Amino acid sequence: DSIDAIGAQLEKQGYCILDGFLTNEQVRQLRREVRECHSEGRLTGGGLVNGRLPSADDAKYADRATRGDVIGWFDPEEWHHGKGLESYLVKLGTLVQELGRPVKDLKKVTSRSKAMAACYPGHGARYVKHVDNDENHPLCRTRLLTALIYLNESWQQGDGGELAIFDANDPNILRQTVAPQQNRLLLFWSDRRTPHEVLPSEKLRYSVTVWLLDNTKKVDLSAGYPEPERSPRKLATESCPSSLGPSQVRYTWHLDDSSWTLEVQLPLSAPETCPVLDVSEAQVRLSAEGGQILCVPLPEGEMAAPVPKW
């Protein structure tokens, strides 16, 4: 039946795309609710950690998000915009429970996270390549399956915001590009099996993400984050779409002795004012008057965030 087919696809390729998951009225209702939530200012900058984040887990995720991403974390009892979110979560929970029959790993699911409503407001907002559960950070280690539903009724080619899925063994190999079309549910393993990236979004992009959790994993927070395994340090050079126009920003990491230097080449159309540098645990963000310029991951093998010197 359909559950077996969905399970087989998830087992075989690590992700599964389900179009038309909700009824037309259900998905329109959920979209209305998320847009209302956004308009009321309940979604805040993904790069900011503030009191609205209900837990350290949420703060950890927010710190890795790009500056243009606005997010909010909600359970049905704190969602006053309607019944659409609750209906979706019930239907999603039923699906995951049924998938536990053909997909043995899903029998480990004991709970879910809060629902993360998100909006990429366009202008090139993106989220660099990452995994949702890197198996190092205790606060992310229980994430087993990511469930993401898109709420973009008039999305068309060129609007951007697609989710690019990469090969687990070689993250430079693109496996699939998923368009964020309305009422499309995307399921994928949260761990290193599914590296992914949100490509630059040129239009408003709405979604709701839920993580299905395996809370049988022991998570000890008393000692802080474990030391990641050291890997050879590599230089990285990448062309990155910019919000400055058709020109592209290029960057290169240079390693001198034991310190890294980030060299950025801005196009001629770059603002005259010096960009603002912001460093999180996972990436460096450059922004200037008029919008974001660049979001780049820290060099591979970096053990701690570098200290800004600008």
Image: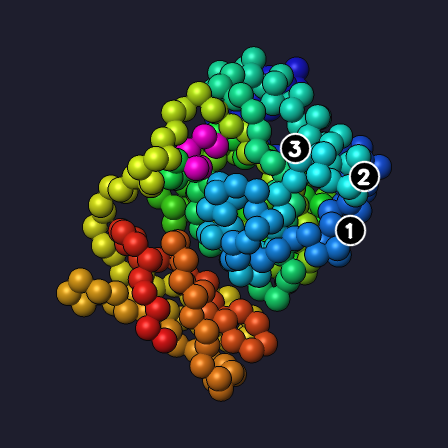
Left or right: 127 in relation to 83: left
Left or right of 274, for residue 68: right
Q: Identify the amino acid type marked 2.
A: Gly
Which of labels 3 and 2 is toward the front?
A: 2
Is 292 located above or below residue 189 in the figure?
Answer: below
Q: CA distance from mark 3 to mark 2?
A: 24 Å
Amino acid type assigned to the residue bearing label 3 in the image: Leu
Instruction: Indicate which disc, 1 or 3, sits on the residue closer to the N terminus.
Output: 3
Disc ID at residue 36 = 1
**Could you classify mark 1 by the number of other residues whose Cα lies within 10 Å: few (under 14), some (14-19), or many (20 or more)?**
some
Is 41 placed left or right of 225 in the picture? right
Asked whether 12 or 301 is in front, the reply is 301
Question: Residue 250, image x and y in percent?
Answer: 40, 71
Q: Determine the image quadrant of residue 114.
A: top right
Range of magenta residues? 139-143
Q: Quadrant of the N terminus?
A: top right
- The kind of residue on which mark 1 rests is Glu
Q: Position of residue 271 (x, y in %)?
A: 51, 83
Residue under pointer 2: 82
Asked whether the residues under the numbered discs 1 and 2 touch, taking CB atoms below 8 Å apart as contact, a structural biologist would say: yes
| Few, some or many residues within 10 Å of mark 2 (<14, 14–19, 20+) | some
Farthest residue, direction right: 25
Instruction: Residue at 28% x, 69% y: name it.
Output: 261
* Circle on res. 18: 3
Regarding mark 1 in the picture, which secondary structure is present there? helix
Residue 124 quadrant? bottom right
Q: Is residue 141 magenta?
A: yes
